[in-house]
Image (spheres, helix red, strand yellow):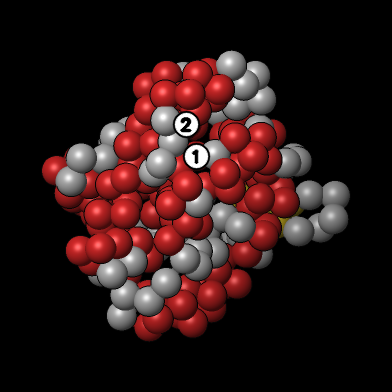
Amino acid sequence: MSFVTTGDDGVTRCGWAAVEPETTYHDDEWGFPLEGDDAFFERVALEGFQSGLSWRTILTKRENFRAAFAGFSIEKVARFTDADVARLLADAGIVRHRGKIDATINNARRAEELIESEGSLPGFFWRYEADAEAEPQSQTTSAESIALSKELKKRGWKFVGPTTMFALLQASGIVNDHALECVTRERVAMARAAARPTVSRGGA
């Protein structure tokens, strides 16, 4: 059974969401379907930057990341130059990791290619929804995240390992990994049910 916590507000949540900023992120974003190509690109980028770090680190720097990466506009980031890389490496407001910065710019260019060939990022990523979900928060990878990672790497994406891609599937609602007892689980389930027909047709 997944670990849960009941806050001072009397709400039962996933155990990792006991304090801010995790609580608000959990209640309002984690597991809810994303809309649009740039939203998926942002989440891929942030999950990549999180690799080896805590999610709290990314959450506290999130607005800085958005400012530094042009709101995670795929079109704009794909055209970043060496001057932008130097600017980002000097930006103390983000995670200054050369490999992750280069990967984000590379992935914006690969995202443009993927959208051109597949129609949209939401339509592509939702193909990796599991037929049946495992016990919530019982795994860090899945057959689907492994397959997604392999496909993206084949297409030239970077920092998209199976664990990072499973985190993406969780965060974007393709997997509902809220604990069974979590108050947000049913809200996510309803949001996923409403979103799935749209994204499965390749809509953004």
**Location of mark 1 (residue):** 46
Q: Amino acid at mark 1?
A: Leu
> Is 45 drawn above or below residue 201 in the view shown?
above
Residue 57 in the image: state x and y as whole percent.
62, 29
Q: Secondary structure at mark 1?
A: helix
> Of 122 and 90, which appears nearest the observer?
90
Q: Position of residue 150 (x, y in %)?
A: 17, 44
Q: Residues within 10 Å of mark 1 (few under 14, many from 20)?
A: many
Looking at the figure, which quarter contains the C terminus?
bottom left
Is the residue under label 1 in contact with that under label 2 (CB below 8 Å)? yes
Specify the quadrant of the image occupied by residue 112.
Answer: bottom left
In this picture, is 91 found above or below 128? above
Label 2 sits on residue:
49
Left or right of 90? Residue 157 is: left
Front residue of 165/155: it is 155
Residue at 66 percent across and 25 percent down: it is 93
